[in-house]
Image: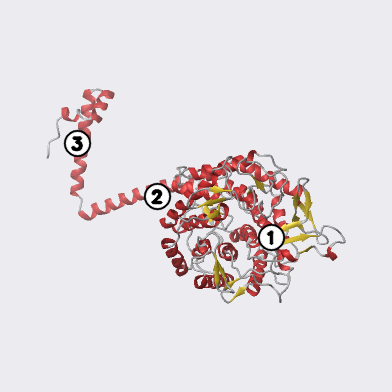
Amino acid sequence: MTPHPPTRYLLSCPATERLRQCVGPESAAALVWQFQKNLHLLLERWKQLPRLQRVVVVMVVIGVLVGVTLLVTTYFTAASPASPAHTPKPSHLAYKMENNLTPPPVVPHPPQPSQDRVAMVPEEQAMKDEAEHEGHDQIVPPPGLPQKRSARQEAVVGAMKHAWKGYKTHAWGHDHLRPISRTRSDWLRLGLTLVDAMDTLWIMDLREEFGEAREWVATQLNFNLNQDVNLFETTIRVLGGLLSTYHLTKEQLFLDKAVDLGERLVSGFNSGSGVPFADVNLYSRRASKPKWGPDSSTSEVTTIQLEFRDLSRVTGNPIFEEKASFVSDHIHKLPKIEGLVPIFINAQTGQWRSHSTVTLGARGDSYYEYLLKQWIQTGRTIDSLRMDYNESVSGMERLLAARTHPSHLLFFGELHGSTKNFVNKMDELTCYLPGTLALGVHYGMPRHHLDLAKELMYTCVQTWLRQPTHLAAEITYFNTQPNGMDGEDFYVKNNDAHYLLRPETIESLWYLYHLTGNVTYQDWGWQMFQGIEKYCKVDNGYTSIGNVRSTTDTKPKDKMESFFLGETLKYLYLLFMEDQTAFSVDKWVFNSEAHPLPIYSH
């Protein structure tokens, strides 16, 4: 038997030193000696056991330890609140099944509030549990590709392929395709259609076409041009398209291009007030007022914040976000008309052109959209954005909302001139608003905004489906008199009868379907898509038309806008998607050009 080590050696160990202090030297020595003796006897008995018995004992002990570990892990996991990054939001279809909601068929009147519901987001604190470090607080990873397409989605993919083929054949690397004359046109000289369409190609899983676009971006996209470009349009289409594609693919190429462009565009903020000029020269990096007047458009200076903020978050360079956020803060402090704003602002003075129009359409529209979307993008942490948004919707209800005769359709008119006289016209551009209102309700805005969204959605749809082409005119005038317009709710003037392949109504249909699950919105969108297919499709792509009021004299305009691929077809594809979770509005905020950007925690 191996002799025990001397007591004096044992008492020199740290543990036995503490034992000696507690019970005294002699007692400590006795206890240690007894422990050593018992341990030695146990080892001797273990060695006497047959090998098989020792294996069985070891396995039983390991099993007990594993079982205890699993129980402890399960207990603490169940006791901890789930992070939204790891708790998928139930799809609207699952929500309907749980609540026994059956969507209604297509009806000749707006869906009623009882027919569908808007699911609410998780509690505020859940959003803030995410990591807070700069540039890396994106709440969700990029989505996976859809497992299958619906038949309607396949039709939209076919349209995308047809448009892309025409562009590739006759306008490759240029801004726009002229499909009838089989030529091209340039505006910004930045391959606008190609860059605008990249994330649509990715979302539709058109990898061959996406690869072609990627190669052009890698080898041909050059921002070192002695060219004045519109700050707003370049930001939402090109910068937004590059950032969105980066988030979807995680390819550094697209971020590098976005940084190069952003560093040139940020010079647009070098004005007397910090409110940006309308144009920027990409080569000299000098900003200037627009050629058509002294002021910038309100919607343009307030619809670049999502993109510049995202660029700061992914690069860690705060300058982009600081410049853009300053504009929002400045606008917040300016006087307004019950939350509504004029459509022109001077970049040098930072003041409104007070006698300019108040409208939810051209030059005013996306100011209101980005109030809400910035608030969402920043984890609902900037109260001034929420306050300005809610005040503006109240102003819309009080000053701009009106009803038609005889059908009592809701529309939002305009205020013109220094006296702010009400004018009963509404742009097709205004039809972004139902989607924005519904998105706001989803994030906790006043519940009655959803009723406004549904009613305005129905009006917007009627401006499409009551035309023989099932396409909407650029501007519609509404009848507010009992005996006016020969008993029609609205009419279109000759100069306003064009359809430019715009997406706004389809965009709102997607939001309403995405948030309520009411398939009526899908069916309306399908009817509109059929109008596009029948009256805008030509041999080499799709064309804008000059007259939606005739099926025999549509007056094709021979131009395919970049936003047809970047927005219209993307929103149609999302509208007909069976699984709405991949691009949930709890994970992504779509910029004004339909480019999805991640939501951050702050």
Q: Residues within 10 Å of mark 2 (few under 14, many from 20)?
A: few
Q: Residues within 10 Å of mark 1 (few under 14, many from 20)?
A: many
What kind of residue is marked 2?
Leu
Task: Name the N-terminal-most of marks 1 and 2.
Answer: 2
Q: Nearer the viewer, residue 49 or 72?
A: 72
Its colouring scheme is secondary structure
What kind of residue is marked 1?
Glu
Q: In what element is the residue under mark 3?
A: helix
Mark yes or no: residue 228 visible: yes
For marks 1 and 3, give the CA distance.
92 Å
For label 1, the residue is: 428
What kind of residue is marked 3?
Lys
Task: Name the N-terminal-most of marks 1 and 3.
Answer: 3
Q: Give the residue at x 72% y 68%.
A: 465
For label 3, the residue is: 37
Question: Left or right of 220: which side holds 183?
Answer: right
Mark yes or no: residue 599 visible: no
Q: Nearer the viewer, residue 499 or 84?
A: 499
Q: Quadrant of the N terminus?
A: top left
Q: Please provide percent x and percent y for residue 138.
A: 48, 49
Which label belongs to residue 70? Answer: 2
Q: Please provide percent x and percent y for residue 265.
A: 51, 50
Q: Nearer the viewer, residue 398 or 111?
A: 398
